[in-house]
Structure formats: structure tokens, C-alpha cells
Amino acid sequence: MVFGIVFAPLNVPLHRRIQTLATVFAVSTFFLGHVLPWLFIVVGLVCLPGCAPLLITYLFWIYVWDRDTPSRGGRHFTIIRKLPIWNYFRDYFPVQLVRTVALPPDNNYVFCCHPHGVISVGHFTAFGTEAVGFSSLFPGITPHLLTLDMNFRAPLLRDFLMAHGICACNKESCLNCLQLGRGHSIAIIIGGAAESLEARPESTTVVLKRRKGFIKLALQTGASLVPVFAFGENDLFKQVSNPPGSLLRRVQTRFKDTMGFAPPIFYGRGIFNYSMGLLPHRHPVYVVVGKPLAVEKVENPNSDLVDEIHEQYTKSLRELFESHKTQYGLDDSAQLVIV
């Protein structure tokens, strides 16, 4: 320890170093995916003018001809989802996908994911890769993890996301994914940006009370609602205190309302130290997939029906949390806080 910083020892096993490098790649993609691609393109245009026609054609392609693909089911490449790097990324924490019941492949599902965490490590690993064996646990089901539309405006990042089966999070995209055929399903992180501001160790707060759009979507399509809880997701980073009503929380909320995403002030560990940095801490994450809540298709559901199904879903989520909390790292006294 030097000046309060705990440094990693020199004799760290090679496999753990590779796990860290895989995590550096993933985190860099999450945090710099909107900046680095543009930097590469600008450098290419300036330093390699011969590549200009190719780069301009690519930009024309993604912003004109291919711009709607993220809302039309995207592009799903199993070979990309199975890249070895994701196995090392999984083992860094590690992340485990837990199936509580089998899901028939002749149905469509809305996987309702909680909590968001800072960067949703567990949900990305479970639904955006094959590192935890989604296809083996849920054969015949094709997941489409959803993320903010803005993430598909950056060159290269959009193609990286779509290759993993990730699509835009908007109504059109949800409907298109669920209508691709039997088994095609979506995974939505219900709390979204607001919930990331609650992500801190041992927090069990989820943003759900006013989130009812996913209920209406399930009713309109007849897709079953599946509660998913990632135990340990909130333990990967520490966050500066920002209780509701504080100046920091007000600034963060205003930023979220304006830009569409929240800027949590967080820290984890570094590449060569365990005390400070932007890498997540090594902490197990258990993504537990609960029992589906069957929903009868209603083209124009009224608010009373939406509220009724929302109440049933909330009950299912609480039951999932209570049934598994002690098994996956929480005390028996831990309570699911819904705001």
C-alpha cells in the first residue's frame, strides 16, 4: 500500500491478467465508444487520404441506407457473441446466468432486467454474449438486449452492438423484435438511466413504480413478462453520495432529462491497483431469470389493465428477489426497494 492505494502484486497469474485486459477492452468500449471511432475516422481522412472514399461510403451507409437497422431487429452474429474474449470477461467477476424454470421456445418474452448498475455488466454478459450459455439454458430463444438510441449514432460502435444482437430501445424496435418470429425476445433494463444513480454497493433500489410502458408492450404483443435480477451488479463500483434532493442529484437528474442518460460519479479499481480507477471490482454477479408471467394479448389495453398487470409483475419480482437474496450474497434482512 502506498499513500492509501493498494497495488496489485507482480505475481498475478497470467489468466487473471488476461481477464483484466478483456475487461479493459469492454469498459473502454462502453465509455469511449462515442469518441474513439470518430478519432479513427478523422485520423484516417487526414493521414490516409486514399481511404477517404471508403470512409465516406461507410458513413453514408450507416447514416442513410442502414440507419433504421437498429430498430428493425439489428444484425445477430453468433460467432461474435461467442468470441473467447467474453469468456475472460465473464471470469473476471465472474458472471453466472441462473435459470429457475425452462422457457418454451414457441413464445415471445420480455426479459425485464433489474438493476441497471453503472454499466449493466451482468445483463450484457447474459443477453449480449454467449459467455454464460444463454442458448444452452434457453434453447430456441433469441434475445435482443436493448440500449439507448444514441448508442447507434456512433460509427463502429453501432456495428459492434448489433453484432451482439443488441437493438435500439424504442417502441418501434421492441415491436419489430417481438414480431420476428417465435422465440425472438427483448431484454429491457427497466430502471434505465435513473436507476444508474442508485448503483452503489449493497443497494437494492430499483426504479419501477412509474415504469409501465413495458407492461403495455407485453399486452399489445402477448409476450410473457420475465423478471430478471442481477445480484451483485451494484457491487462492481462505488459512487459518490448523491441522495435524492441533494445538489448533485438535482444536477444529474437535469442532465438525464436533457441528454437521455445519467452521469453517475463512480469509481472502481485500476489496472495495476485495487483502490482507484474505472475498472469494475472483481465481484460475483448472478443474473437470475425468474418465472414468466403470461399475458393475454390486448391490442388497446386500458390503464386499469396495465396497472393490474404491473402489480402482478411487481409481486413476481419481489418473490424472485426474496427467494434468492441470501443464496447470492445478500442478508436475510435485505429488502427490495421500489421507487
Image (cartoon, grey):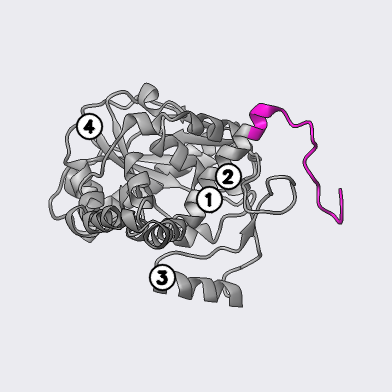
Tell me which secondary structure the magenta stretch mostly adopts. loop
Residue range (magenta): 1-17
Name the N-terminal-most of marks 3 and 2.
2
Checking the image for residue 259, the label placed there is 3
For label 2, the residue is: 24
Query: Is residue 255 visible in this depiction of the protein?
Result: yes
Q: Horizontal and vertical percent for residue 267?
A: 65, 56
Residue 68 lies in what quarter of the image?
Answer: bottom left
Q: Horizontal and vertical percent for residue 52?
A: 30, 58
Q: Secondary structure at mark 4?
A: loop
In the drawing, does residue 274 fall left or right of residue 135?
right
Number of the front mark, 1 or 4? 1
How many residues crowd around disc 4 within 10 Å: few (fewer than 14), some, or many (20 or more)?
A: some
Q: Residue at x 35, y 29 (%)?
A: 79
Give the amino acid type for the residue marked by disc 3 in the picture: Met
Number of the front mark, 3 or 4? 3
Number of the front mark, 3 or 1? 1
Distance, label 1 to label 4, CA atoms, is 36 Å
Query: Is residue 109 visible in this depiction of the protein?
Result: no
Q: Horizontal and vertical percent for residue 36?
A: 46, 57
For label 4, the residue is: 107
For label 1, the residue is: 28
Number of the front mark, 3 or 2? 2
Q: Residue at x 43, y 27 (%)?
A: 99
Q: Residue at x 37, y 45 (%)?
A: 160
Q: Horizontal and vertical percent for residue 261?
A: 44, 64
Foreground pick, 197 / 87: 87
Give the amino acid type for the residue marked by disc 2 in the picture: Val
Give the amino acid type for the residue marked by disc 1 in the picture: Ser
Q: Secondary structure at mark 1?
A: helix
Q: Residue at x 64, y 48 (%)?
A: 202
Distance, label 2 to label 4, CA atoms, is 37 Å
